[in-house]
Amino acid sequence: MSCCLSNQVLTHYVGESKTYYADLGEAIRGRTITGVTAIVSDDAALTLSGLAVVSVDTSEANTGVSWTMAGGTAGSDDDEFTATLRVTFTTSAGTEQARVRVQVVNALP
């Protein structure tokens, strides 16, 4: 499993299907996530599934989300990121959204 803070960029290889998680604690400042509604990408070739709240006893418990990501469209090595994920979730403040940036790259030969 690979992690990032919501303001960092995840690196994802096109040929992999892998579980990732993002710590949204900075974005929600003291609130906890009570549920997750959706995750979407502006890269139609990315397959996203298994969205869940990270609820185990870690520093991301109830402030992080996890999902499985596969596929994607590789960008140039010079791209800072190639896709943006939008995660919709609920907290005590209501429905909120966070963005996670992803750099999709081809697998090494």
Image (cartoon, helix red, strand yellow):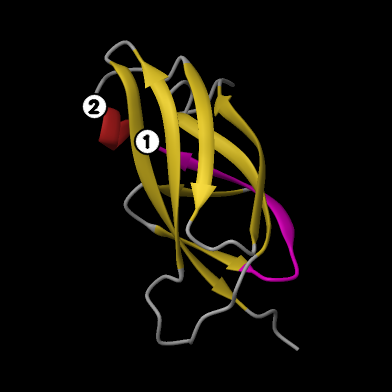
| Label 2: element kind | loop
- Disc 2 marks a residue whose amino acid type is Arg
Q: Residue furthest left?
A: 29
Rendered image quadrant of residue 81: bottom left
105 and 72: which is toward the camera: 72
52 and 83: which is toward the camera: 83
- Disc 1 marks a residue whose amino acid type is Leu
Q: Earlier in the sequence, mark 1 or mark 2?
A: 1
50 versus 10 height, above or below: above
Location of mark 2 (residue) = 29
Does the magenta run of residues contain 20? yes
Residue 30: give x, y in percent of width and height: 26, 20
Specify the segment rendered in magenta: 13-23
42 versus 28 height, above or below: below
Characterize the magenta stretch by its predominant secondary structure.
strand
Would residue 104 appear left or right of 24 to someone viewing this image? right
Residue at horizontal 48 percent and vertical 87 percent from the top: 77
